Structures are given as C-alpha cells and as structure tokens.
C-alpha cells in the first residue's frame, strides 16, 4: 500500500507529460485524488494504539552495501503523509499550470511520500535528494524576479548539506555495517561512535538537516526562495518540504546521537531561540508580504526545534512535560503546514488582483473584499496562536513542556510570540483598514472557485483548534515511545 502511494504520483507525472497542456492540471488533480484515497486507507488501517512501525514492506535491494527497500509508518510518518496529501492539491488550485509544472509537482510529491516512509538510509537519501531537483526547477523556470539567484542559492545550500549528511552516514556504515534506522537507534542508546569520529558524523548530519529546516544561522536561502517561487511552489516549500528537516531530526539525529545532543544542549537551544526571535523581528521589518510570511515560517519551525531540543538536550526521565512538548512539536508540524500554505495562498490572491504584494500597495480592503479579508484574518490569527484555532494547540503544548524542561530559553523564546503578533497586526492594519486605496477600488471579492479552496482549509483550522484529539490520536503512542527513547 505504501509503495502504491509512492508510485501513483510518479505515474501521474508521466501521464501529465504526455497529455495536452490544457488537460494537465485536471489529470494531476485526478492522481492527487487517488493518492488522497490511498492515504486515507493507510490511516484507516493504522493501529494508533500500537507502538513501532506498521504496514512494513521489506525487500532485498542492494545487499552488498546493506541497502534494503524498507518502508513503514509510525504516527509521525502517517501525519506527514496526510499533510502532503492535503497541501499538494491545495497548491494546484492556486495558479494555471502546464504539463511541466504539474509533472514536477507530482514528482516532488512522490519523493515526499518516500522520504516520510523510508526506514533505510540509502532509500531515504534517494527520496530526500529526489525532492531537491523538482523544487530547484520549479523555482528557476516559473519563479519571479531574481529566480536564477534564488534557485541557485537554494540548490547550493541544500546540496552541500546533503553531501555532508551522506559522508556522515558512510562513516557510520563503515563503523557499524548497517543503514537501518531502527538498528542504528538501538546502537545509539549506548553510543553509536566514539571520539572525534562521532562528532564529525554528528556535525555532518546536523548541518544537512539544519539547512533543510532551516535553523539559524543556516536559513538565509529561504526568504529568497519563498519570495521568488510561484505561489503554489511556495505553499509546498513551506507546507511540506521544510518538514523534511524536522522529520530528519526526529528520525535520524536525535536517536543516533543522544550523548552529543545532551553535551551541546544549551547551544542547540540557543540556536532554536535565535530562529524564533530573530526571524520574527526580520518579519516585522519586511514590506513584501511573501517575504514576511517566509520569515515567520522560520519562526514557527523554531518552536518545533525548541520543543525537540528541550526534550533531548536536558537530562530528564520520561514525563508528562516531555510528552507534551513532543506532542506539540508533531502537532505544530501539521498546523504550520496548513496555516503557512493558506497564508501564501491569500498573498497569491492579492498579487493576482493587484499585480503587487507590498504591504503599502493596498489599503482599506475590508470595504471592497470583506470575505477575502475575513478568511485571511482567520489564517493570520491561527499563525499567531489565537485560542480556538489550530495554531494555539501546538504552541501551547510546546511551551507547556519546554518551560518545565528549559525554562530560561523558553522564556526568551516567548518574545517571538509578541513580535509575531505585532507583525501580523501591522499587516492587517495596512491591508484591511483605513481609506480604500484607489488602485484597489475594482478588486473582486472571493469567487466561487476560491471559496471552494478557502472554506475547507479554514474549517480544518477550527476543527483542530476546538477538538484536536482526532489528530493527536494519530501519534500519541509514537510520542510515548519516543519520550522513552530520548530519555
């Protein structure tokens, strides 16, 4: 079933490539509907009360180097599969798309499914790198101004990080003779490697994943890439692709190097706090809406890293606080994917209507487009963590757990919440309030096709904010298992 999930978008990209240009998006959406059905079947067959991997598929692949075709799901993997199945079709609705665009998006979707389900490093790295090529081409071909610079910067950063990670895993393989994640995690409990070799392997994997998240100070590629990319691509980059880095920390770095994490704990927590505070301050200073949301994406992923490092960098026994922080991290991964993608979608709608996306290019939109302003406000309030919306639950759980485990760092990180609220309040005042700008006097409000996209995603924000248990149930058992492992 997991293999089918990976292969369906791959087959879809081939069908799209051979289709007529005006049929491309319809075919792509058809294959997305099929993958959504497969993802739902996986969810139905997944036993949320059982620990460990489920629905495992294992086949011999390259036995000479210990590489297997090994895929499986735990709660976190399933959560990210569901998120991918939501965000990719959401992005297809944003803009007209030809054959090349749709084929590359489907190829990236296949790579994402593989990344979130592979349990052997060689297979995982293949899918991980497979996602880099379509993302680079989507930015370089369909991006806006300065797309060549942004695409090259994105490729260089992520490629160098990937090379460092590959060299580290080769060192681990020569030392331990396996690429299997579960076997390496068992070895990691008592020290995977020793001496300088362990620190070199840790540094390589940390660098590769820190660039992908991105974590301060490895984040400088992100604002350029998100600003330049087409709106649909920006939605996928922030909604799903950035989660590969956080997922890698949970699946690779933290179980394999618990001793190194504890030694560097204060420094790692400081990096997470810098990501939260500095990114929110940078967002406050922006005048371009896409660039503002890009920096706020770094800010919100910083909350995830704060929760992870608070759990793993402090010497503590498994506790309610550890489980709360991990649950908050997993839920924040899902919530941020939905909310950030929605914000980019709204900015795309404004840019379609005005041709510009600067904060000062609009004014008084509430008088002309009350529906657009109202629904966009909900996404903004969700991003800043208003109670009753999905963003609040994840952030509350992260801070609840992190305050008990790393109080001083968490206290500083709270500044990011305040600055984020100020940035959104300033944007809402400039966009929605005041006299109607003359250039916006002919703006149309949301049309039927746009409402069909906006309403379901907004209802999901409310559903998670009011009754989050249906999402928490997916990974509760995984959280308990990981809390024991990390302790």
Image (cartoon, rainbow, N blue to C red):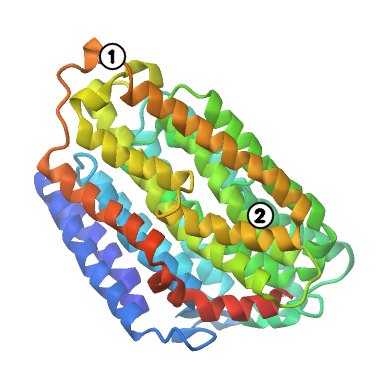
Residue 83 in sight here: yes
Instruction: Give 208 or 10, whichever is nearer the viewer.
Output: 208
Mark with earlier residue (2, 1):
2
Residue 45, x across and y down, in percent? 34, 85
Which residue position holds label 2?
A: 306
Query: Is 267 rendered above or below residue 394?
Result: above
Q: Residue at x 55, y 24 (%)?
A: 285
Q: Is residue 310 left or right of residue 350?
A: right
Residue 402, x across and y down, in percent? 68, 59
Picture quarter containing residue 434? top left
Describe the element under mark 2 as helix, strand or loop.
Answer: helix
Query: Is 158 rendered above or below residue 374?
Result: below
Give me the disc on residue 259.
none
Where's the N terminus, which quadrant? bottom left
Query: Separation of disc 2 and disc 1 at Cα?
Result: 41 Å
Instruction: Give 81 or 414, whichever is nearer the viewer.
Output: 414
Residue 103 in sight here: no
Q: Residue furthest top?
A: 438
Query: Is 383 rendered above or below residue 53?
Result: above
Q: Is residue 37 left or right of residue 421?
A: left
Q: Residue at x 31, y 50 (%)?
A: 104
Instruction: Give 184 or 378, whichever is nearer the viewer.
Output: 378
Describe the element under mark 1 as helix, strand or loop.
Answer: loop
Residue 319, x across and y down, in percent? 69, 76
Q: Residues within 10 Å of mark 2 (few under 14, many from 20)?
A: many
Q: Residue at x 78, y 72 (%)?
A: 316
Which residue position holds label 1?
A: 435
Where's the C terminus, which quadrant? bottom right
Query: Is 385 rendered above or below residue 54?
Result: above
Residue 435, x across and y down, in percent? 28, 14
Q: Residue at x 25, y 45 (%)?
A: 100
């Amino acid at each position: 079933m997991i293999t089918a999930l990976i292969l369906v978008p791959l087959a879809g990209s081939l069908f799209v490539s051979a289709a007529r240009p005006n049929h491309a998006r319809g075919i792509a959406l058809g294959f997305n509907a099929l993958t959504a059905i497969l993802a739902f079947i996986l969810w139905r067959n997944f036993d949320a009360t059982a620990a460990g991997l489920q629905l495992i598929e294992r086949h011999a692949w390259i036995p000479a180097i210990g590489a297997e075709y090994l895929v499986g799901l735990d709660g976190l993997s399933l959560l990210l599969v569901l998120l991918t199945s939501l965000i990719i079709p959401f992005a297809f609705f944003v803009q007209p798309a030809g054959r090349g665009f749709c084929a590359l998006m489907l190829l990236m979707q296949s790579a994402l499914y593989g990344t979130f389900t592979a349990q052997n490093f060689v297979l995982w790295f293949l899918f991980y790198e497979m996602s880099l090529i379509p993302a680079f081409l989507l930015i370089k071909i369909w991006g806006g101004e300065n797309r060549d610079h942004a695409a090259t910067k994105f490729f260089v950063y992520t490629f160098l990080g990937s090379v460092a990670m590959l060299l580290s895993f080769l060192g681990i393989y020569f030392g331990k003779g396996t690429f299997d994640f579960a076997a390496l995690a068992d070895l990691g409990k008592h020290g995977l490697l020793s001496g300088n070799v362990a620190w070199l392997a840790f540094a390589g994997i940390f660098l590769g994943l820190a660039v992908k998240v991105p974590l301060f100070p490895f984040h400088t590629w992100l604002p350029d890439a998100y600003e330049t990319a087409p709106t649909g691509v920006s939605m996928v980059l922030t909604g799903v692709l950035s989660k590969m880095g956080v997922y890698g920390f949970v699946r690779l770095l933290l179980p394999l190097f618990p001793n190194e994490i504890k030694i560097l704990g204060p420094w790692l927590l400081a990096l997470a706090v810098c990501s939260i505070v500095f990114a929110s301050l940078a967002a406050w200073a922006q005048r371009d809406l896409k660039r503002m949301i890009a920096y706020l994406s770094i800010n919100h992923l910083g909350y995830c890293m704060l929760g992870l490092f608070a759990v793993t960098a402090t010497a503590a026994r498994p506790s309610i606080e550890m489980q709360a922080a991990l649950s908050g991290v997993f839920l924040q991964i899902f919530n941020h994917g939905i909310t950030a993608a929605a914000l980019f979608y709204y900015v795309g709608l404004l840019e379609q209507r005005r041709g510009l996306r600067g904060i000062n290019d609009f004014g008084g939109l509430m008088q002309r487009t009350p529906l657009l302003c109202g629904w966009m406000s909900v996404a903004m309030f969700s991003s800043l963590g208003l109670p009753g919306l999905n963003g609040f639950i994840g952030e509350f759980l992260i801070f609840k757990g992190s305050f008990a485990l790393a109080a001083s760092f968490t206290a500083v990180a709270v500044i990011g919440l305040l600055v984020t609220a100020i940035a959104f309040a300033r944007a809402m005042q400039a966009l929605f309030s005041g006299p109607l700008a003359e250039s916006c006097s002919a703006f149309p409000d949301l049309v039927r096709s746009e409402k069909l996209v906006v309403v379901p995603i907004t209802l999901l924000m409310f559903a998670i904010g009011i009754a989050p248990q249906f999402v928490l149930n997916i990974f509760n058992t995984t959280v308990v298992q990981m809390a024991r492992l990390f302790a």
